[in-house]
Amino acid sequence: MPEMLTIREVADALKVCEASVTKWFADFPGVIDLGTPELVRRHKRRKRCLRIPRAVLDRFISEHRIAA
């Protein structure tokens, strides 16, 4: 089983806020979204609960040339 990181752990590793991590990784391939679906009829905002595998984070860092 690969190591799965939370939004907070990735934010700490990249030294950015959690909102940035959520925006960057929401639709990134390989990220698991455990959050709630968006309820269009009730106009409720979707809750994000992402799990980011270590390999996906490493790929993101190499593609964006981030020094972590």
Image: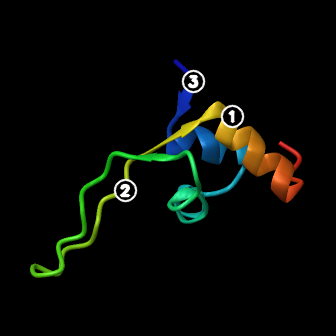
**Would residue 64 be found to the left or right of residue 39 on screen?**
right
Q: Nearer the viewer, residue 28 or 12?
A: 28
In the image, what residue type sits under mark 1?
Ala
- Nearer the viewer's eye, disc 2 or disc 1? 1
Q: Is residue 62 above or below residue 41?
A: above
In the image, what residue type sits under mark 2?
Arg
Check the image and tell me how it is coloured.
rainbow
First in sequence: mark 1 vs mark 3? 3
| Residue reaching furthest to the left | 42
Quadrant of the rendered image containing residue 57: top right
Pick the quarter of the image with the C terminus: top right
Q: Report the disc number at residue 55.
A: 1
First in sequence: mark 2 vs mark 1? 2
Q: Where residue 24 sits in the image (x, y, percent)?
A: 61, 62
> Measuring 62% from the left and 48% from the top, which residue is drawn there?
11
Q: CA distance from mark 2 to mark 1?
A: 20 Å
User: Of helix, strand and loop, which one carries label 1?
Assistant: helix
Q: Is residue 33 above or below residue 19?
A: above
First in sequence: mark 2 vs mark 3? 3
Q: Nearer the viewer, residue 6 or 57?
A: 57
**Would residue 48 be found to the left or right of residue 37 on screen?**
right
Check disc 2 and report the residue beneath it.
48
